[in-house]
Image (tube, rainbow, N blue to C red):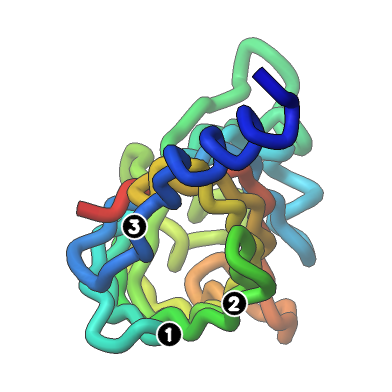
Amino acid sequence: MEPATELAREEAAYVAPPPRSRGVVLDANLGVMGFTGRFREMAPLAPWLHAQIGYEVLSWLMILGEGELAFTDTSGTQPPPKTRAFPIFGFGGGARASIPIGASFDVYAQPTIGAMKADIAKNALAILGFRDAEVLNLYFAGRIGAEWFQTSRHLALGAAFGLRDATGFARLGAGETPLVWDASGSIRYAF
């Protein structure tokens, strides 16, 4: 059999993956959360888990809800054995606008609004000047990222960077803008 004939037969047998359709999307991120301002002096980088579920109303627009969990401690200002470990949790909602780059890549921007807090015993952070971190406070966030769609058009791998104004994580009386950043890798599944 001639190589050209076999190549033509293989090309005819190839079935391209179906185009990605709109629908429900589940997205999970694993990364790191960091802080700016005085909170950074108190708390080191935190391992960060983030999940969101959304619905693609248009091929380029998704409405979503999100939840997150991070773990850090007070080791920057309290040496052991006084160091206190605590989780930070939050939830919110927003939208994601995507721009395709070729058949396999997307870049996106995602504004969100939500609330977050440090889950720690009452007044444990207040004595360090961060009383508002112990209760739910609003955040306004933005995230940019890129996704690489796999052969299965349901699955994508990605990377993202986010920045938020976390109003409750400012030191009392410091007059600072408390920014919280995150960087992560993600896996996305579209149903």
Q: Amino acid at mark 2?
A: Pro
Query: What residue did someone put label 1 on?
Result: 60
In this view, the residue in front, 127 or 9, is 9
Q: Of discs 2 and 3, which sits in the foreground?
A: 3
Q: Of discs 1 and 3, which sits in the foreground?
A: 3
Query: What residue did someone put label 2 on?
Result: 100
The numbered mark, 2 or 3, whose residue comes first in the sequence reads 3
Marker disc for residue 127:
none
In this view, the residue in front, 82 or 96, is 96
In this view, the residue in front, 46 or 2, is 2
Q: Mark 3 packing: few (<14 Cα in 10 Å), some, or many (20+)?
A: few
Q: CA distance from mark 1 to mark 3?
A: 18 Å
Q: CA distance from mark 2 to mark 1?
A: 8 Å
Residue 111: percent from left, percent from top: 49, 84
Screen quadrant of the N terminus: top right
Marker disc for residue 18:
3
Marks 1 and 2: in contact by CB < 8 Å?
A: yes
Q: Amino acid at mark 3?
A: Pro
| Vertical comparison of 21 with 7: above or below | below
Element type where label 2 sits in the image: strand
Residue at screen point 27% across, 68% down: 21
Q: CA distance from mark 2 to mark 3?
A: 16 Å
Q: Amino acid at mark 1?
A: Trp
Residue at screen point 51% across, 26% down: 85
Residue 124: percent from left, percent from top: 45, 42
